[in-house]
Image (spheres, helix red, strand yellow):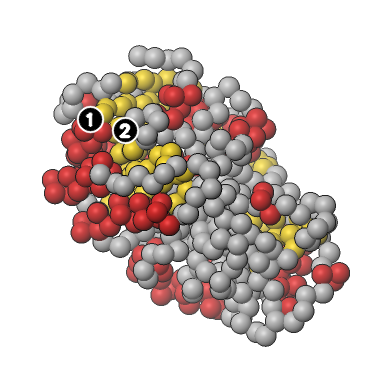
Amino acid sequence: MDHGRPTRRALLATGLALATAGCTDGGAQSPPTPGGDPGGGPSSPPTTPGWSDLEVSGGLSRPGQAGYDPSTLLYNPRFSPAPQAVAHCRTADDVAACVRHAGRTGTGLRLRAGGHSYGGWSAGDGLVADLAGMDAVELAADGRTARIGAGARLVDVYTALGAQGVAIGAGSCPTVGFSGLTLGGGVGVLARSFGLTCDQVRSIDVVTADGTSRTVDAGNDPDLFWALRGGGGGIAAVTSWTVAVRSAPRVTVFFLRWGLERGADVLAAWQRWAPTAPRELWSTCKLLRNPADGDRVQVSGAWTGTAALDLSGLLAELPPPAANTHRTLGYLDAMLYEAGCSGLDAQACTARALDGAHRQPFAATSSMLGTELPQAGLDAALAAVRELRAPAGLVEAGMSFDALGGAVADVAADATAFPWRTALATVQHTATWSGPADPGPFDAVVAGTRDALTPWTGTAAYVNYADAGQPDRAAACWGGNRGRLQRVAAAADPDGVFAFPGGVRA
């Protein structure tokens, strides 16, 4: 076993290359439209915005002014937003001012947390309320809950909580916004033991479409509370979250790799083992094409149990892997490891995640694996990855199967807006590339791998892996919860102040 710090090649091989590893998970409250915004926004006739009337404590940036840099708004550089103004919000009152301005003038409004929206919906051509200044993380005096600002990034949340010996289950990409992740449900590396991130929410501070600030929970506006846990945004502006925390566990992280030719065998063994393993064990299985580092199938994950990590249920069915590593870490160090930031503090981790080498353009879509793939489905998955037509500039492409089950399945399908509680896994289809290129061929790559599974997965999808080109997206993302979610959205925001192309009413 190799217990040392992974090399750059090992980081890529373990799925920590940020885009393909799910580093684009969530990150936008009003979570694709390069250089524009084709829809969404208030239905009332717009008036000419009077920007001098909008005052926020962090200031307002307009084209040509200091602080106006649209290239920093979105993680995915395939998009080129050009908003009329960026409001740098620091308080709930700032957010309320932006909401009232949008409602009064008809200006399209986007709320940006981490900027990781797959569809580029964290920014548009109207007003962007940038919540980055609202990133405080405060542990309650009793140590049972924490209040997390709407602009906090995951690395900041993990650092603040881990330093006080408590933990929350969330995603792996360090710069994803906690808000966007949670609004979509929140699949992460501790999901099977902690539940979805939205399952850990106890109350939410919001600004509603009328510009009013209030707190919602199970007893105060339960419909809105329900919708904001898995509904994907576009209903109200979250300003902070109160979440349950628990004692931070020790975490054993592991990584296994085989050649891609073993893909069907590894996926077959993994899908029988992973969803029914002890709930302290979360894992992901990836089928990957990588021209530089080699094609491969890999299984990696995290174990939070008190006994020693035991992978025999998986390995007994397979040939020895070409790589087999594990290491046991404290909670914060494990989260930094999963983020590809071992040995770095939060500031350095953020800078690394946002540098040019990691902010590669990407295309993505998703499926939900409801039941085990039969042999025909396993063969189709492998063939779709091995035989995909790699466009020029491709860095990596493939499928990532992330295990559900455990605590995720403890919650009823209609208890929150996230509907896929009994699924075995989410499936993320991704393609990353370097340099300027037409996104079309890469969109075709991910659509192709998704379509290869459709005979067995159907059209169900995970809202945080947003795909603007997916037919009947609302049904795909919310299934049987769509009707209630649409009714809540219409009641909470009748004029569409928060509407955007990826919302439930789009």
Residue at the image point whose x is 56% and y is 35% from the top:
357
- For image coordinates 77% across by 79% down, the residue present is 48
Give the labeled residue for mark 2.
Answer: 295
Of badges 2 and 1, nearer the viewer stands: 2
Percent across and percent down for residue 152 are 64, 46
In the rendered image, the residue lying farthest to the right is 52
If you read the primary sequence from the N terminus, does the residue marked by circle 2 or circle 1 appear first? 2
Q: Secondary structure at mark 2?
A: loop
Q: Which mark is residue 81?
A: none
Q: In this image, 431 relative to 30: left or right?
A: left
Q: Residues within 10 Å of mark 2 (few under 14, many from 20)?
A: many
Quadrant where the N terminus sits is top left
In percent of width and height, residue 345 lies at 64, 27
Q: Nearer the viewer, residue 436 or 42?
A: 436
Q: Residue at x 63, y 78 (%)?
A: 42
Give the amino acid type for the residue marked by disc 1 in the picture.
Leu
Quadrant of the rendered image containing residue 420 = bottom left
Q: Where residue 97 sits in the image (x, y, percent)?
A: 77, 67
Image location (x, y in percent) of residue 395: 43, 39
Q: Which residue is mark 1?
A: 314
Q: Secondary structure at mark 1?
A: helix
Spatial CA distance of label 2 from label 1 is 21 Å
Against 405, residue 504 (above or below) is: below
